Image (cartoon, rainbow, N blue to C red):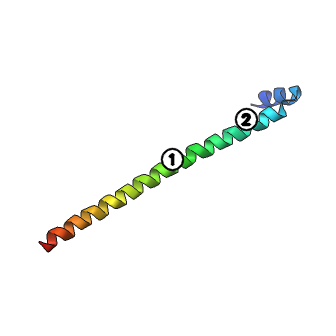
Amino acid sequence: MDDLTKTIIERGDLAHLALFLWASGASALLVWSLREMASANKRFNDFVTEIASLNRLFRKGDD
């Protein structure tokens, strides 16, 4: 990566390097947030499933 950075600096493409770093960071943040949302959705789904099973258990007790 050091040679690539030197080449970019020598050619004067610092704006391209900055844009690439920004896009890489934004993409990594997007992937991380999507993974977090998926895991939160799974935890919420598990919670709702447990509540539904408790409701079924309590309804059977009322009969």
Type of amino acid at the residue the image marks with label 2: Phe
Q: Secondary structure at mark 1?
A: helix
Direction from residue 47 to residue 53 in the image, left or right: left
| Residue that carries the numbered disc 2 in the rendered image | 20
Q: Residues within 10 Å of mark 1 (few under 14, many from 20)?
A: few
- Whether 13 is drawn above or below 29: the answer is above
Give the distance between the C-alpha atoms of the residues marked 1 and 2, in whole angstroms: 23 Å
- Numbered label attached to residue 19: none
10 versus 29 height, above or below: above
Q: Secondary structure beneath disc 2?
A: helix
Using residue 20 as the reference point, say whether residue 57 is left or right of it: left
| Amino acid type shown at disc 1 | Arg
In terms of depth relative to the viewer, which is nearer, 39 or 3?
A: 39
- Quadrant of the rendered image containing residue 46: bottom left
Direction from residue 11 to residue 48 in the image, left or right: left
Q: Position of residue 50 (x, y in %)?
A: 30, 62
Whole-percent x, y for residue 30 in the image: 59, 44
